[in-house]
Amino acid sequence: MSDFDLGTKNLRLEREGPILWCTIDRPHARNALTPSMYFGIKKAVHLVNADKDLRALILTGTGDVFAPGGDLGGRYEEGDQKVPEGLHYEMLPFVTIRESMAPVISAVNGICQAGGLLIAMMSDIAVVSERATFRVPELLRGIIDATYAATLPVHVGMAQARDLLLSARRIDAAEALAMGLISRVVPHEQLREEALKAASEVLQTAPECRAHVKRMLNQQYPPIDYQTMFVSLMSETSEAREGMAAFMEKRQPNWIPEGLPT
C-alpha cells in the first residue's frame, strides 16, 4: 500500500484481504520508535477505521525486535514528517489503539519494551512469539511514565505492577503469560498465521456490540497524569536529562549508589 503515506519510511504497510499489516522496520536502530513512527502507527489505526475495505490492523516488527520504545535521541530521519514537539499524548498512539473500533492485533516477534510494550498492551490481543522478552525500563532512564502507572495494575495487579515498574527487570514470554500481561504465546515460526487467526476470530464478532464491550472494558483504566510526565521530560534539571545522557554516553546515571552489589 505504497499509495498511503504514514509519514516515515520505517513503517511498512501490506494488505492481506481485509487485514492491514503494519511492520515496524528500522533495523539499524533496533526498531527504536522516532516521533514520526509513533505518529505513523496512530495514522495506521485511523486508516483501518476509515477505509471500508479494511477491517483490522496487525502490528509487528522485524528480526528479533518488535519495538524497544522511543528513540531516546528523539531523532527524525530523512523523509520523516515532523510531528508536534515533545511526546505529547496527541502524538502517541496508545489511546488510539485502545479505543479503535477496528480490531488491533500485536504480533510480538521479539524484544518488546517501553512504548513497544504499551502498544502490545493496548491492542485487543497480543499474539506473542515464544522468543519475545518484555521490560518496563523507564525508571532506568529517569522517565516518569504515567501511562504505565495507570494501566499496568489493571492488567497484572498491583503487586506485579510494582515489581515490573520499580525493578525494571526483563521477563520472558512464559512469565509474561503467567502474570497475565499477555494472553497468547505461540511457536515463533507460527506467529504470522496465529496473528491472522486472532484477527479473524475478533472479526467474527458483531462490530457494534464489540465496540460497546470495549468501551466498558476501557472504563477500568484510571485517568493518566500526563502533566507530571511531560513536565518531568521537559525540565532542564530533571532526572530524565541525566538518564538520557547516561544512556547515550554508555555510563551509569549519577543516582546509582557507589558500591552497589551487582
Image (cartoon, rainbow, N blue to C red):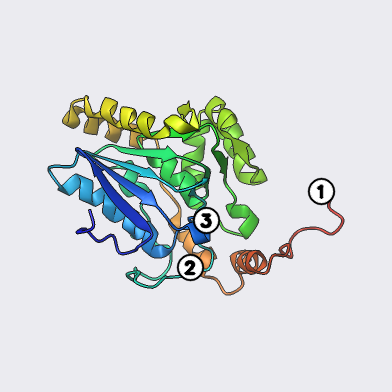
Residue 49 position, x and y percent, is 20, 45
Q: Which residue is mark 1?
A: 262
256 on left or right of 200: right
Q: CA distance from mark 1 to mark 2?
A: 30 Å
Q: Residue at x 52, y 65 (%)?
A: 233
Q: Let me know if residue 139 appears in the view.
A: yes
218 on left or right of 15: right
Q: Let me know if residue 89 appears in the view.
A: no
Q: Nearer the viewer, residue 105 or 95?
A: 105
Residue 52 position, x and y percent, is 12, 43
Q: Amino acid at mark 1?
A: Thr
Q: Earlier in the sequence, mark 2 or mark 3?
A: 3
Eyeballing the image, is 131 above or below 237? Answer: above
Picture quadrant where residue 247 is located: bottom right
Q: Which residue is mark 2?
A: 74
Q: CA distance from mark 3 to mark 1?
A: 26 Å
Q: Which mark is residue 235?
A: none
Task: Please identify, in this view, whether the residue under mark 2 or under mark 3 is nearer the observer.
Answer: 3
Q: Earlier in the sequence, mark 1 or mark 2?
A: 2
Q: Which mark is residue 30?
A: 3
Marks 3 and 1 in Cβ contact (< 8 Å): no
Marks 1 and 2 in Cβ contact (< 8 Å): no
